[in-house]
Image: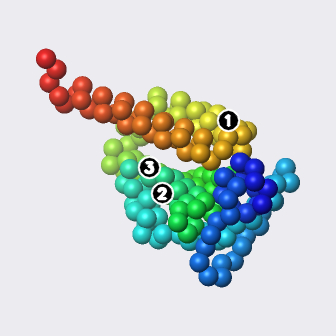
Amino acid sequence: DSGDDRGGSGGGGDGQLCEVDGDVALRTLTSKAGTVYTYPSPNQKVAKTLVGGLLTGLLGVGIGEVVLPQLLRGGKGGAACVPVPVAAGTSVLTVIVSVAAASTVQWSQLLADNGISVIPFNLVCWQIPGVVVGAQIAARSQGRWSQAQVETAVGVLFAAIGALFAAIVAKAYLPMY
């Protein structure tokens, strides 16, 4: 085990070996930088993944938030199993496929019902470059922070987004005196 915070061989990003029950096949990947990742095949929770897929289909969100924690904490007692770089890449691929399928269905229905004039292109034209730039920043900064730092940052981000949405709802629906 390399013991580095970037998820080298032996399991999760915190340098600890993932404990699993029984005989589990190991996977080994080597990054372009030469880092070798060896980890057990993740034990996926099918029900949770299906719920994430359902939310993605209905709302366009959810599957990444379901898959990533399963990959990171899939071992015995919640131990990290899949290294952060591998889990993040797997989660992104899952999100891409799920969102592409859900978007195709939603856009097709939207176009069939109301035509192209109802698509908010003023938002779409800014969202696409934002996603491209964000993906490049994420790819270049991958592996620079420990798993605990990334989890904390994502938790703070989701809390901030939740607080903003709560403020918007409160402003719209609660009478202010």
> On the rendered image, what quadrant is the C terminus found in?
top left
Q: Point out the tag, 3 or 1, that comes first from the N-terminus.
A: 3
Asked if 25 appears above or below 85 in the picture, the reply is below
Question: Which residue extends farthest right?
Answer: 34
Tell which of 112 and 102 is nearer to you: 102
Q: Point out the tag, 2 or 3, that comes first from the N-terminus.
A: 3
Q: Which residue is mark 3?
A: 61
Tell which of 17 and 73 is nearer to you: 17
Location of residue 32 in the rendering, given as x and y in whole percent from the top left corner: 84, 52
Tag 2 secondary structure: helix
- Residue 137: name its quadrant: top right
Q: Point out the tag, 1 or 2, that comes first from the N-terminus.
A: 2
Location of residue 133 in the rendering, given as x and y in whole percent from the top left corner: 64, 34
Q: Say if residue 29 shows up in the picture.
A: yes
Q: Residue at x 44, y 52 (%)?
A: 62
Crowdedness near tag 3: few (<14), some (14–19) or many (≥20) residues, C-alpha within 10 Å: some
Q: CA distance from mark 1 to mark 2?
A: 23 Å
Q: Which residue is mark 1?
A: 137
Asked if 105 appears above or below 146 in the picture, the reply is below
Tag 1 secondary structure: helix
Tag 3 secondary structure: loop
Q: CA distance from mark 3 to mark 1?
A: 21 Å
> On the rendered image, what quadrant is the N terminus found in?
bottom right
Q: Determine which of the numbered discs, if any, sits on residue 66 in the image.
A: 2
Location of residue 138 in the rendering, given as x and y in whole percent from the top left corner: 66, 40
Asked if 61 appears above or below 49 in the picture, the reply is above
Q: Are marks 1 and 2 in contact (CB under 8 Å)?
A: no
Please state which of the two labelled residues, at mark 2 or mark 3, is closer to the viewer. Answer: 2
Q: Determine which of the numbered discs, if any, sits on residue 65 in the image.
A: none
Location of residue 123 in the rendering, given as x and y in whole percent from the top left corner: 46, 31
As shown in the figure, which amino acid type bears the numbered disc 2?
A: Val
